[in-house]
Structure formats: structure tokens, C-alpha cells
Amino acid sequence: MAGIYRAIRTCAAASRRGLAAAADPSKEAAAAGLRAAAAASTGRKGRDREDGRRVQWVFLGCPGVGKGTYASRLSQLLDVPHIATGDLVRDALAAPGPLSKQLAEIVNHGKLVSDEIIINLLSKRLEEGEEKGELGFILDGFPRTIRQAEILEGVTDIDLVINLKLREEALLAKCLGRRMCSQCGGNFNVADINIEGENGGPRMYMPPLLPPPQCESKLISRADDTEEVVKERLRVYHDLSKPVEEFYRARGKLLEFNLPGGIPESWPKLLEALNLDDPDNERSAAA
Ligand SMILES: Nc1ncnc2c1ncn2[C@@H]1O[C@H](COP(=O)(O)OP(=O)(O)O)[C@@H](O)[C@H]1O
């Protein structure tokens, strides 16, 4: 994968300057070269590939849908890193300096940070992974705009895009119920969702994912998980990120997955949809 991630930045910079490939043949050649290099270094699609590359998957879905939960479980199962751009943004927010102030202004209002900033953060993370010998990834929270999707598609092969879906009524409650332990970093959810089935279907039940006693007094919420900001993030998702689903659908890469309920119910069904076996399914479904 050598060099692909520096190429993401190069592509992003070219796109930012409005250098349409057609208007600049040297850029067209550079883009073609990047695609060839990406294809050669990552080989063709597949899970266990001859070239040793592992999966390069993307998770899409509204805030609160559970992308982080399922992406993290799959990353353990498939032995690839789970890279959440929201986490990269929160790390940058926590580091002192002007970028942190600039990000806080955007994130705390439920807006998206600029493609330039997010691509810099992601490229840096991918380059670090490459140096450590990471062989694939599951991206969560990227791409979120058509431009981000085009840049990613231009530089590497994404094998599969999983679009997680959950009924609208549950999304807000799930975001507002999110908690993290400030000491161990564990993620929990205090929302207790039990809603009528749709069109005569079964009720949807998502029990809370409660912390162990030692974490109870250390729970914190994300600053952007307030009702007003979550509603704005859902609005932004529908405006800017929904078209990304169409981008991948048109390329035959989109797997739609409707979450039927909480983790114990959904995880085995997701594995089935992905044609995967979890050797430790029972333990991990109940966790
Ligand atoms: N790909 C991205 N493009 C732009 N902004 C992003 C991206 N990923 C994350 N962010 C910023 O980080 C915030 C938190 O992201 P995330 O943890 O993925 O939250 P969500 O629960 O909204 O999916 C977003 O509201 C946005 O400001």
C-alpha cells in the first residue's frame, strides 16, 4: 500500500485547487498513475488475498446507528484496524493549539469539518498504520461527502461498503444515551429502546448497554451529543452523506443492512449477511 495515503493528500490538494483533470493533462496522467499503483499494490478484491492485503471496508450510516460498535467488532474479527474519523477529530480537539479551537467551533455545532482537514488527519493515520505494517482497514465516518468518496475511490480499492440502517425514532435516543468511561475508555449506552413494530412487524427492542460498577461514577458524554447538535448532525447526514450511499450503490459496492435490534440480535445477522463466522459468537454477541 506504500504511498497510497500520501496520494490521498495529493489528490485532495489537486481537487481543492479546482484542477479538473481534463483541464490539466499532467494531472490526468498523475491520477491514472495513482490508480495503477493502487491496483498493483493492493491487488484485486477479496478477503484473504494472495498479496497479503486484508479487507478495505467502509461503514456508512447516520449518527447513532452503531457504526463504531460493529466496525470495531469486525476489525477484531478480521484483524484490521478500525479507523473512525470522529475519533481522529476528537484526538485533534484534545491536543492544544489553533486546530483544536477551529475544530471545536465546527464539531460542537454539528457541522462537518473541511475535507482538507479530515483528509490530512486520515492520511496521517493511514501512513502511521502503513509504517506499523497494517494490511487493511475498516473506515467509520469516512467518506462523508461525495468529494471525499471520489478522492478515496481514486487512490485505492474499497472492497465493500456496509450501510447500517436503524429506524429514525431510535437514532436520537441512541445518540443521547451514549456514555464513555473517562478512565478505561469503554463505550456504553443508557438508552432503553422499545418501540412498536413497523407495518405490523415485531417490536424493536434495544436494551441499554450498561457499564460495569467500576465505571459507573466515571461516565461522560460527548460534547456534541446534545439534542440540538444531534438533530443538526442528522440533518447534515441527510444532506451531504446520503448521496455517498448512491455513489457506492452505483458502483455495486453497497451492502444495505437494517439493524433488527440490539447487539445480540444484530451481530449474528450481520455476520450472516457478510458470510463470516465468529468463532466466539455467543460470548461476543452477549457482550
Ligand atoms: N469524514 C468526515 N468529514 C467531515 N467531518 C467529519 C468526518 N468524520 C468526522 N467528522 C467530524 O467529527 C464529528 C464527530 O464524528 P463521528 O464521531 O463520526 O460522529 P457521528 O456520531 O455524527 O457519526 C462530526 O460531527 C464531524 O464534525
Image (cartoon, rainbow, N blue to C red):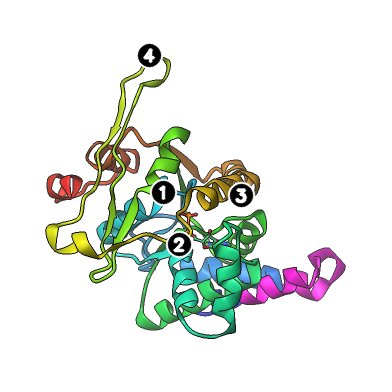
- Per the image, the residue denoted by label 3 is 236
Q: Earlier in the sequence, mark 3 or mark 2?
A: 2
Q: Position of residue 240 (x, y in %)?
A: 64, 50
Q: Quick one: label 2, few (<14), some, or many (20+) residues within 10 Å?
A: few
* Cα distance between the residues tagged 1 and 3: 15 Å
- Per the image, the residue denoted by label 4 is 200
Q: How many marks?
A: 4
Circles 3 and 4: CB atoms closer than 8 Å: no
Magenta residues span: 8-29
Q: Earlier in the sequence, mark 4 or mark 2?
A: 4
Q: Earlier in the sequence, mark 1 or mark 2?
A: 1
Q: Secondary structure at mark 4?
A: helix
* Cα distance between the residues tagged 4 and 1: 26 Å
- Per the image, the residue denoted by label 2 is 223
Residue at image location 13% in from the left, 58% down from the top: 213
* Cα distance between the residues tagged 1 and 2: 11 Å
At label 3, the amino acid type is Val
At label 4, the amino acid type is Gly
Front tag of 1 and 2: 2
- Per the image, the residue denoted by label 1 is 175
* Mark 1 residue's CB less than 8 Å from ligand 1: yes
Circles 1 and 2: CB atoms closer than 8 Å: no
The image's mark for residue 148 is: none
Q: Secondary structure at mark 1?
A: helix
At label 1, the amino acid type is Cys
Q: Quick one: label 3, few (<14), some, or many (20+) residues within 10 Å?
A: some
* Mark 3 residue's CB less than 8 Å from ligand 1: yes
In the visual, does 241 lie left or right of 140? right
Front tag of 3 and 2: 2
In the visual, does 60 lie left or right of 137? right
**Most distant residue in the top direction:** 200
